[in-house]
């Protein structure tokens, strides 16, 4: 009798559930979404050293 090991939730490290995979609950999924929306996470971008500097974002 082998128990299936589920990957850990990336937020709280509890076993993930099928319903909220890769998270364990709606709460952890919402925490992750909030981190993306608040820009705590970012996808790295390679900058071209020959490109002009980016314009400042004045709408923030």
Image: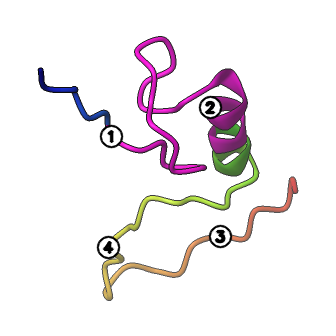
Task: Quickly name the residue at label 2.
Answer: 29
Inspect the magenta stretch and tell me whether residue 13 lies in it.
yes
Inspect the magenta stretch and tell me whether residue 51 lies in it.
no
Q: Please report contact status of discs 3 and 2: CB closer than 8 Å, yes or no.
A: no
Q: Nearer the viewer, mark 3 or mark 2?
A: 2
Q: How is the image coloured?
A: rainbow
Q: Secondary structure at mark 2?
A: helix
Find residue 59 and name its label: none
Q: Please report contact status of discs 4 and 3: CB closer than 8 Å, yes or no.
A: no
Which one is earlier in the sequence, the residue at label 4 or at label 1? 1
Which residue is found at the position 46% from the left and 80% from the top? 52
Task: Quickly name the residue at label 1.
Answer: 7
Q: Nearer the viewer, mark 3 or mark 1?
A: 1
Which residue is found at the position 41% from the left and 44% from the top? 8
Q: Position of residue 57 (x, y in %)?
A: 76, 62
Q: Nearer the viewer, mark 2 or mark 1?
A: 1
| Residue most extreme to the front | 1
Q: Where are the magenta residues, as a range?
A: 7-32
* Image quarter in which the C terminus is found: bottom right
Label 3 and label 2: CA atoms lie apart by 33 Å
Which residue is found at the position 62% from the left and 25% from the top? 25
């Amino acid at each position: 009798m082998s128990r299936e090991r589920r990957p850990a939730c990336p937020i709280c490290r509890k076993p993930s559930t099928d319903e909220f995979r890769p998270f364990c609950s709606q709460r952890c999924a919402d925490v992750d979404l909030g981190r993306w929306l608040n820009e705590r996470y970012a996808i790295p971008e390679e900058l071209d050293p020959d490109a002009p500097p980016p314009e400042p974002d004045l709408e923030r």
